[in-house]
Image: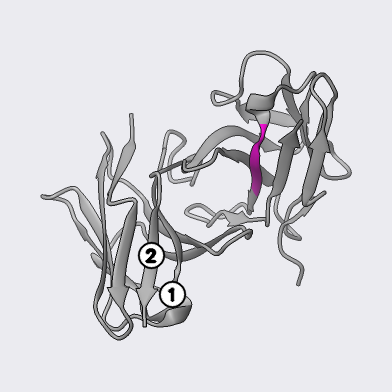
Amino acid sequence: NAGVMQNPRHLVRRRGQEARLRCSPMKGHSHVYWYRQLPEEGLKFMVYLQKENIIDESGMPKERFSAEFPKEGPSILRIQQVVRGDSAAYFCASSGLISTDTQYFGPGTRLTVL
Amino acid sequence: AQSVTQLGSHVSVSEGALVLLRCNYSSSVPPYLFWYVQYPNQGLQLLLKYTTGATLVKGINGFEAEFKKSETSFHLTKPSAHMSDAAEYFCAVSDRKRGNRDDKIIFGKGTRLHILP
């Protein structure tokens, strides 16, 4: 019974490149959340998606960041033209349909921008 | 808007001693409250969760927390610390805009727990 999977676990990019982070939710889960953890900070909400829909993107930076959760395949968090300030751990969580359901977190992707 | 304050970014306790990690929240609606634990280079694991009902919530690994509405607190305790409890602990509150769903979670900044031999 696989949990939430994220890949890659570690990603190194140079300034100006694109970063793509993938998240496969737990089996049967159709809700995905992305969070960012900066050094010495707690996790900050970025975006909440259901299949093919963005429900809440109030935590997403206005530029360079986008997220999708297609009908088939993993959820993707995409960061274009990365800058050093994007270096962080990015966590994905998923939940099912039952109200008061728990969010289960993946192991995270640690992005380093050189 | 919801917010969470964790008192003490670092807490040290001796092995076998009581663990007390403090958390205060603010919320305009009855909150859902969580404690998560994060071991180095790993994701977050849910320790326990309060939704409704009994205010004393028992979690995994011997941890428990009590929801005190009058104090807007949700402190985490464990009677006897173990070396394996060394980790970072996050208190969190959910933003329940859409009915009872656990939507986005608002996290505190975390408390790193050190266990002294």
Residue B57 visible in image: no
User: Dot 1: within a 10 Å radius of its alpha carbon, few (fewer than 14), some, or many (20 or more) residues?
Assistant: some
Question: Chain under label 2?
Answer: B
Apparent side of residue A48 relative to residue B12 in the rendered image (left or right): right
Helix, strand or loop for disc 1: helix
Q: Name the spot of residue B100 as percent of width and height, x first.
A: 43, 46
Confirm whether the magenta stretch covers residue A88: yes
Q: Name the spot of residue A53 as percent of width and height, x first.
A: 72, 30
Mark 2 and mark 1 lie on one chain; the one further toward the N terminus is 1
The amino acid marked with disc number 2 is Leu
Tell me if residue A107 comes above or below residue B2 in the rendering.
below
Specify the quadrant that holds the C terminus of chain A: top right
Apparent side of residue B101 relative to residue A85 in the rendered image (left or right): left
Residue placed most toward the observer, A89 or B106: A89
At 36% from the left edge and 83% from the top edge, which residue is drawn?
A: B117
Q: Quadrant of residue A54?
A: top right
At 63% from the left edge and 54% from the top edge, which residue is drawn?
A: A96
Q: Name the spot of residue B102 as percent of width and height, x first.
A: 48, 46
Q: Are marks 2 and 1 in contact (CB under 8 Å)?
A: yes
Specify the quadrant that holds the N terminus of chain A: bottom right
Apparent side of residue B76 relative to residue A24 in the rendered image (left or right): left
At 85% from the left edge and 39% from the top edge, which residue is drawn?
A: A71
Q: Main secondary structure of the magenta part?
A: strand
Residue identifier under label 2: B113
Tell me if residue B28 comes above or below residue B20 in the rendering.
above
Q: Quadrant of residue B2?
A: top left
Residue identifier under label 1: B85
In magenta, the rendered stretch is: A87-92
The amino acid marked with disc number 1 is Asp
Question: Chain under label 1?
Answer: B
Confirm whether the magenta stretch covers residue A79: no
Residue B77 visible in image: yes
